[in-house]
Amino acid sequence: MKILHTADLHLGQIIYQNYDRSDEHRYFFSQLERWCREERPDALVVSGDVFDIQQPSALVKKAFTDYFVGLHHHCPSMHIIITAGNHDSASRIQADSAVWRLANAHLVGLPPAADSIERDDGWQYQYIVKLDSGYIVALPFMAGNRENVVQSILDKVADDNTDALPVVLMAHQTVTGSDVTGHNFEIGSLKSVEMSAFGHGYDYLALGHIHKPQTIGHQDGEAQAAVCYHAPVARYAGSALHVSCDECYPHSVSLVEVDGHFGKVSIRQLRIEEFRHFYVLPADGTSFTSVEEALQQMAHFVAQGKRGYIRFRFDVHTCLPPNFSQLVYDTLLPYNDEWRYNPKVLWTGQSEQTGNETVKPVFEVAELQQMSDPMVFIERTKDQYPGLDLDDVRQALEEVKAEIRRMDEEKKK
């Protein structure tokens, strides 16, 4: 079995609250299309986080449709398997699954329920895609450990797999021991699961969620373009784009070939060429000590005919004027969005922390997205606001709710 493995597309991402990345995604898909045409894989698997938010715009959904219909047009025999990640709306991904079957694509959004194991109605087959060359178990993001559910699906595959064909398992999770470099823990925590949570019986575990490409337990081979291991093998393909400037490592799509059940797994990294690179100035690793020097060097740098994102490194004693960001935007304006500004300044020379800082609470992204009561968030973060009277906040929220109800009743009259 030959597959192309990618994940974490984050279509529709607006980076630094200002910049649309549709042209960067378009450039990525032009490369993905070329690899599909050249390699002719049995399947393209996308392991979650197709979209950046749960309710993408109509324009972003159209781009998604155009990209994958285009891939099907060029490679009609190639199966496309897409699962929902924690950034996606599971129900929205699932809702379109029947239509996408017409394009040889399998969309799996809703995970199996924790009590599915108690049923005997063949629910496991909803997550099994059988190819002539093997099996793909398509599991979307699942909160919590459901090892018995995963194993039940793999057992169904084992019962059917009398020809010892390869088995690929898809998952969107953080595996204990994975390298999470580049992820922002101030926004959300990454709860990890042990490898044992994925059961046994698969040959290749196509992971999503962590943006750095890596093969679990084989970090020594990451510098090699092509490697071969004995099954089972677990790998993160990594994100399609550098989702943040902190992801300062190469990104790739994984070309995977499995020669048989519990056989050899060959992995080749197909390096993704970025449409826009991330740059930190000064480029020599030092720090600016004056605003004038920073703006002059940036003006010279962007005039060299490249494109990308600019970030500054300043000495902590440098005073930035209140309009510094506007000065940067004005300098970049003639370049028509080819050059973009990351306003998160890197400060050097900071004194060591005292250790008395308040520990900030962390949340899973999906956890934040599912919070419907603002009081839940306020109560979890109350230590960040000394003197906050929770009773006053509750009363104020109740007054707001009452006013909304009154306005709704007025509209109905």
Image: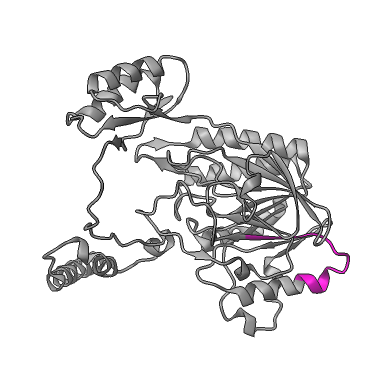
Task: Specify the segment rendered in magenta.
Answer: 157-170
**Position in image of residue 296 (x %, y %):** 30, 16
Out of 56 and 357, give the one closest to the viewer: 357
Residue 128 lies in magenta, yes or no? Answer: no
Q: How is the image coloured?
A: one colour
Number of residue marks: 0
The residue at the point 42 percent across, 38 percent down is: 245
The residue at the point 76 percent across, 45 percent down is: 41
Residue 168 lies in magenta, yes or no? Answer: yes
The residue at the point 25 percent across, 24 percent down is: 327
- Image height of 131 relative to 30, above or below: below
Out of 133 and 187, give the one closest to the viewer: 187
**Position in image of residue 230 (x %, y %):** 77, 56
Out of 319 and 127, give the one closest to the viewer: 319
- Image height of 340 relative to 224, above or below: above
**Position in image of residue 1 (x %, y %):** 80, 52
- Give the image quarter of residue 250: top right
> Where, quadrant-wise, is the C terminus in this rendering?
bottom left
Out of 84 and 341, give the one closest to the viewer: 341
- Image height of 89 relative to 115, above or below: above
Report the side of 411 relative to 274 (left or right).
left
Q: Residue furthest right?
A: 163
Report the side of 265 relative to 327 (left or right).
right
The residue at the point 49 percent across, 59 percent down is: 86
- Give the image quarter of residue 377: bottom left
